[in-house]
Structure formats: C-alpha cells, structure tokens
Amino acid sequence: MNKTGKNFKIWGIRSGLIGDTIMALPVLNHLEKLYPNSYKYFSIAKKCSQAAPIYFNHPLIDRIKITDFAEQEGETDTAIVKECDIVINTTPPVYESGHWFNVRGQVEECFLMAGFSKDEFDNLDEEEKKPYLNLWFDTNKKEKTIAIWPFAGYGKWLSRAPSEQWWREIIEDLIKQGWSIAHFGWHEEPKLSNHQNYHFLCDKSFFDQVKDCSGCELSICTDTGSAWIFGAYGLPQITLLTNHFVQDGMKHTQNPTAFAPCNFNDLNVNLFSEGSCSNITHDRVFEAIKSF
C-alpha cells in the first residue's frame, strides 16, 4: 500500500473538547512525517462545532468533520472511518491513569493517548511540539485593552480560576492604570464591573469572541480551551494556574505547568500558586503585563 499522497486517508486526532483538539494538533505533524501528503479528516464533536472556524486554513487539515451527534459519531462518520487507512481514537482513555499531570504536560499526554510513543514525541522538534492555528481572519486592533477569560469549564469549574472578588479587584486596578477590559467567556458568567471601560462580551458567539479577543493587546486566562486557542495563534497571554486536579486519588503535587497552554511564539507568562488561583497576587499580574 502506498502510504503517501491524498489517496491515503487518516481519521481522527481528538474531538471531545475544544482545548483537547488543540492540544492534539502536534499529532498532525507526526502523521505528516509518517504519511507525507496524506488526506487528514479532523473530527470535532458536534457540541464543540462553534469552534470549527478556528481550524480553517491549517496546513495539515484537509477536511473538518463535525460528528453527527453531540458527543459521538453517527452513520456518516462511520462511513468515512471505513474508508480510512489509519484511524486515531478521538475519545481515548488517559495514557497512564492517576499521575500523568505530575510528570508531563497535556500536549505530550494527548500525543501518547493518540497511540504514539514517548520516543516519537521526543523526536519532534520543539516547534512541531507546539499546537499551531492559522490566524486567517482580520483582527480589529484594540489599543490599551486587556482581554480576560476569567472562569473555566463554562463558568462551573471554580477550582481552576480566581474568585469573583479577585477579578473585581484586579479589574478596578487595571482600569485605574488606564486599561480597558474586555470580558469573554460563557454567557452565564457574572458581570464583574459597572465601569464604562469594562465590556461584557460573553453574549457574542464563540467565534466572534475569538476574533475580538485576538485584537486585544494581551489576554489573561485560566487553563481553558480559550487559552489554548490564543497560544496556538501565538498571541500574548498570561495564564493563571493552580494545582486543582485530582484523578484516581492522585493529586497534582508536582509539575506546576502541566496545564499551561503552549504558545507558538513563546509570548506567554504562566503564573502559578499553590491551592488556588486567588493566591496569585495582583502585583505578579502587573509585572507580567509589563513584560509585554
């Protein structure tokens, strides 16, 4: 079988969550090395279909396929899978249950979950290990504006984000310093200020939020899918991190940047604090902003 060219078809990568699909993008780089110029279907769970435009113009994605059902494949998906020469499990189990986040980051974990080895991951060059997205759309530059994505898990995973009070206080301080604040995220998130230079934009569509955020001078996020998007675009970002994760009784006690998004252009500052993102002082955030 000729394993090169567009007649050689590959299905999969990762489909369950927006952040996961981005973390798994380096798998495409490895597949292209193994099967040059192959035709790659990129599966996205229907529940994440609002994110499909961010993958447009990726050089290694030939077709984006939204699954027939919210979280699983249907008849049309199965028909495509049967025609493919290589099938990557899009909803795999974790590679090593219980402790992976204490020894490696999410990109490497996703690579292993796709069925490849650590040696294969290590053989990628450093740029190939970074998720990449093509910033194909025009951006409306917003001077002296900071984008915030203050909460995680559609506003429901509070252990991954600072408290409302933490955000209210830092927004007030940033506005005093002359910044405008653009608040993005889930439409049910609380508004965090009444100031005229605070703008609640969570009611916009997800892709419109991505476009608006891309025009801001930098973003401040937690370890969410949105942070991975802007990292893959290589845009300036600050990520607030803590060791919130527990799996199979194993706590996240080591490797503090395990959940930090990669930034394609290395324009990122990761701020970590033990126990809670609320323990990250505002002064550390202000210093990080100055570094840009």
Image (cartoon, grey):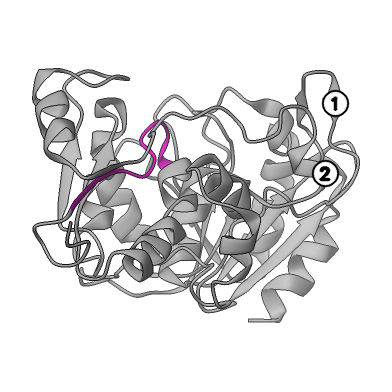
Locate the N terminus and report the quarter of the image it occupies.
bottom left
Say if 240 sits above or below 187 in the image.
Answer: below
Q: Is residue 266 left or right of residue 247?
A: left
How far across and down, in percent of the image, does residue 109 sit? 62, 46
How far across and down, in percent of the image, does residue 265 sit? 52, 79
Residue in front for this viewpoint, 236 or 88: 88
Q: Which residues are magenta?
A: 9-18
* Crowd tier of the residue under label 1, counting other residues whose Cα lies within 10 Å: few below 14, some 14–19, many 20 or above: some
In the rendered image, is residue 26 in sight?
yes
In the rendered image, is residue 182 in sight?
no
Locate the C terminus and report the quarter of the image it occupies.
bottom right
* Crowd tier of the residue under label 2, counting other residues whose Cα lies within 10 Å: few below 14, some 14–19, many 20 or above: some
Secondary structure, mark 2, is: helix
Residue 250 image label: 1
Residue 258 image label: none
Q: What residue sits 32% from the left and 59% below the top? A: 212
Is residue 13 found inside the magenta-colored segment of the image?
yes
How far across and down, in percent of the image, does residue 58 sit? 25, 65
- Please tell me in which quadrant of the rendered image residue 80 appears: top left
Secondary structure, mark 1, is: strand
Residue in front for this viewpoint, 239 or 49: 49
* Mark nearer the N terminus (2 vs 1): 2
Task: Please state which amino acid type lies under the numbered disc 1.
Answer: Met
User: What residue did someone put label 2 on?
Assistant: 102
Q: CA distance from mark 2 to mark 1?
A: 9 Å
Q: What residue sits 24% from the left and 70% below the top? A: 59
Task: Please state which amino acid type lies under the numbered disc 2.
Answer: Asn
Say if 214 sits above or below 222 in the image.
Answer: below
Q: State yes or no: discs 2 and 1 in contact (Cβ < 8 Å).
A: yes
How far across and down, in percent of the image, does residue 66 sit? 19, 34
Q: What residue sits 41% from the left and 45% below the top? A: 21
Q: What residue sits 73% from the left and 50% below the top? A: 258
